[in-house]
């Protein structure tokens, strides 16, 4: 997955962006910066001509790091052009070694193509941003979700040791410090977040509450989940879509289908994620689809569930040959749906690929009901044993990292 600095534009923002871009081009059509802005506009709105504009920007100024970065993002979405995208990412980083967004993309490239170098490259970025703890903290989530929690903890520890100022919101800082322990020690996540909330109750208004919900969900603590749902309904409103999406997910996991259906109705429409091709990021970050299918089938909508499942299975199967850019969670998302629908061999093969491409696939959680469908499959049972062994090893290594940092910081 390549990250972009350009989010989807709202209509008013799009009109302003277009006006600014066209004005800049009219003033100086030979400006590399104006051509880059024009290319970014075309790319973000899925219009033709973006590649020509990026090439023109680079021709006008071969040292324009932003143009190389935008071109890399553009190429990453095209089948069969990943090597060109990787080369453009490397060139952007050579030109601007302090670009955080380019580092994110570069580390993802190394994780996909040369994992043996990943630890060294992550150590290098820690040095590059040693005076910018905010940057180090912003690298944590991507490292965890790409399947490298140990490296994520290194970013947290380096940020804590930095002399630079921390300006990120307190809930983001606390989120970053707890996040590397997801899947490794959910009880620790709960302890850290609950302690932070007790010390600073204002954090209860922020997104860290969803981290707490998911940790309690993985621990199977339904009573505590219900308390948190009630609290957030009071704070955010009972019809809040993000809250209802989380409620729909966890109620489906706990077989509370009537409650899940009511929450799902308030959460819909769930956005489709453009990277993995599945129903999107509102429910527990991916894996919304198998959760929704459980709800549909349990509430008498079998035909609708079957049509939806086959639609996305066909889509994912078509994407697999060129899906390197989706990252490990793309494989796990596909595995979750395949397991849900009884395609056990396909699911196990996808999980094997995710395990091969990362240290600990973030969304491979055997306790979830769709993965429980795979129990008894020899390949799956072996994967679970391997995952358990990796968790023990990685957790020990992370505890050792923390102890070493604490010893070094002690006068």
Image: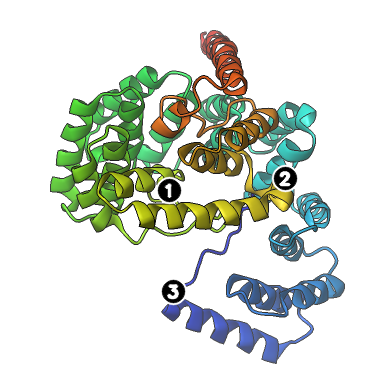
Give the mark count.
Answer: 3
Q: Give the percent coordinates (x, y) of residue 179.
A: 45, 30
**Badge 1: residue crowd in 10 Å (few <14, some 14–19, many ≥20):** many
**Badge 2: residue crowd in 10 Å (few <14, some 14–19, many ≥20):** many
Which residue, given by chain and number where applicable, does mark 3 sit on? 10
Q: Nearer the viewer, residue 188 or 47?
A: 47
Q: Is residue 206 visible?
A: no
- Color scheme of the displayed model: rainbow
Q: Nearer the viewer, residue 203 or 294?
A: 294
Q: Nearer the viewer, residue 252 or 170?
A: 252
Question: Mark 1 vs mark 3: which is more N-terminal?
Answer: 3
The image quadrant of residue 63 is bottom right
Q: Is residue 195 above or below residue 399?
A: below
- CA separation in Å, label 1 and label 3: 26 Å
SS for callout 1: helix
Which residue, given by chain and number where applicable, does mark 2 sit on? 106
Q: Give the percent coordinates (x, y) of residue 356.
A: 69, 29
SS for callout 2: helix
Question: Mark 2 vs mark 3: which is more N-terminal?
Answer: 3
- CA separation in Å, label 1 and label 2: 30 Å
In this rendering, the label closer to the viewer, 1 or 3 = 1
Q: Is residue 347 left or right of residue 189?
A: right
- CA separation in Å, label 2 and label 3: 29 Å
Which numbered marker is on residue 5?
Answer: none
């Amino acid at each position: 997955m390549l990250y972009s600095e350009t989010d989807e534009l709202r209509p008013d923002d799009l009109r302003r962006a277009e006006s600014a871009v066209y004005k800049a081009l009219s003033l100086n059509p030979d400006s590399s910066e104006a051509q880059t802005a024009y290319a970014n506009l075309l790319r973000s709105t899925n219009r033709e001509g973006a590649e020509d504009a990026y090439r023109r920007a680079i021709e006008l100024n071969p040292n324009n790091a932003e143009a190389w970065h935008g071109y890399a993002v553009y190429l990453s979405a095209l089948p069969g052009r990943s090597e060109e995208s990787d080369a453009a990412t490397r060139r952007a980083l050579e030109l601007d070694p302090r670009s955080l967004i380019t580092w994110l993309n570069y580390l993802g490239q190394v994780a996909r193509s040369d994992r043996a170098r990943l630890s060294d490259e992550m150590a290098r970025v820690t040095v590059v941003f040693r005076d910018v703890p905010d940057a180090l903290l912003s690298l944590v989530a991507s490292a965890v979700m790409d399947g490298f929690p140990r490296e994520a903890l290194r970013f947290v520890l380096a940020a804590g040791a930095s002399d630079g100022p921390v300006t990120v919101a307190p809930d983001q800082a606390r989120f970053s410090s707890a996040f590397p322990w997801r899947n490794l020690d959910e009880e620790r996540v709960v302890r850290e977040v609950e302690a932070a909330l007790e010390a600073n109750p204002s954090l209860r208004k922020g997104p860290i509450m969803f981290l707490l919900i998911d940790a309690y969900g993985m621990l199977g603590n339904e009573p505590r989940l219900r308390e948190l749902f009630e609290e957030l309904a009071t704070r955010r409103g009972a019809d809040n879509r993000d809250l209802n999406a989380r409620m729909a997910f966890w109620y489906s996991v706990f077989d509370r289908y009537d409650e899940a259906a009511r929450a799902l109705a308030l959460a819909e429409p769930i956005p489709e994620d453009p990277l993995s091709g599945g129903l999107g990021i509102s429910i527990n970050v991916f894996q919304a689809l198998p959760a929704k299918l459980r709800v549909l089938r349990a509430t008498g909508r079998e035909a609708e569930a079957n049509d939806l499942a086959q639609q996305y299975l066909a889509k994912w199967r078509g994407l697999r040959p060129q899906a390197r850019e989706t990252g490990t969670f793309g494989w796990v998302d596909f595995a979750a749906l395949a397991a849900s629908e009884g395609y056990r061999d396909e699911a196990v093969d996808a999980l094997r690929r995710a395990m091969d491409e990362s240290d600990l696939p973030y969304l491979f959680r055997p306790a979830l009901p769709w993965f429980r469908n795979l129990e008894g499959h020899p390949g799956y049972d072996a994967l679970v044993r391997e995952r358990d062994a990796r968790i023990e090893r990685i957790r020990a290594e992370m505890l050792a990292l923390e102890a070493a940092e604490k010893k070094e910081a002690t006068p």
